[in-house]
Image: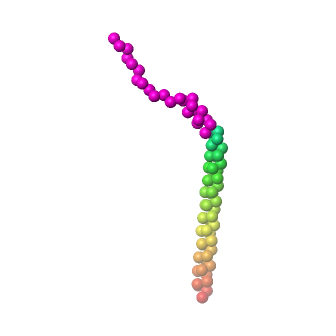
Amino acid sequence: MQAASQPVRAHTAPSVTGALRAVEALLLGRGQRVARRNAWTSVLEDRRRAKDRIEAQHVLEAAASRSSSAT
């Protein structure tokens, strides 16, 4: 009787893959954190500018309504 054969599996070298990921994490890890921090700072700055733009629009509309009612 023949013994049950194991399925053939393709093995990638986990040590090489793990090493490459570790090197990538070392090289890109800090850069990615900086990029995310810069992106978040940009989002906050965009929100601040949008708020300022809305406030300026309200001031201009209020000034326009006062000047039109004064004429």
Q: Quadrant of residue 30?
A: top right
- Assess whether residue 13 is covered by the magenta stretch: yes
Q: Nearer the viewer, residue 49 or 62?
A: 49
Range covered by the magenta-colored residues = 1-24
Q: Position of residue 70 (x, y in %)?
A: 61, 86
The verdict on residue 70 being magenta is no
Q: Which residue is drawn at the image coordinates 57% and 31% (left, top)?
A: 16
> Who's the residue at 62% across and 79% down the image?
63
47, above or below 64, in the image = above
- Depth check: give the residue in front, 53 or 58: 53
Q: Is residue 25 above or below residue 38?
A: above
Q: Residue furthest left?
A: 1
Residue furthest to the top: 1
* Apparent side of residue 15 relative to residue 5 in the rendered image (left or right): right
* Snapshot quadrant of residue 5: top left
Q: Residue furthest bottom?
A: 71
Residue 41 in the image, given as x and y percentages of width and height: 64, 55
Quadrant location of the N terminus in the rendered image: top left
Q: Nearer the viewer, residue 56 or 13?
A: 13
**Residue drawn at (62%, 37%) of the image:** 23
Residue 20 position in % (x across, y down):
59, 35
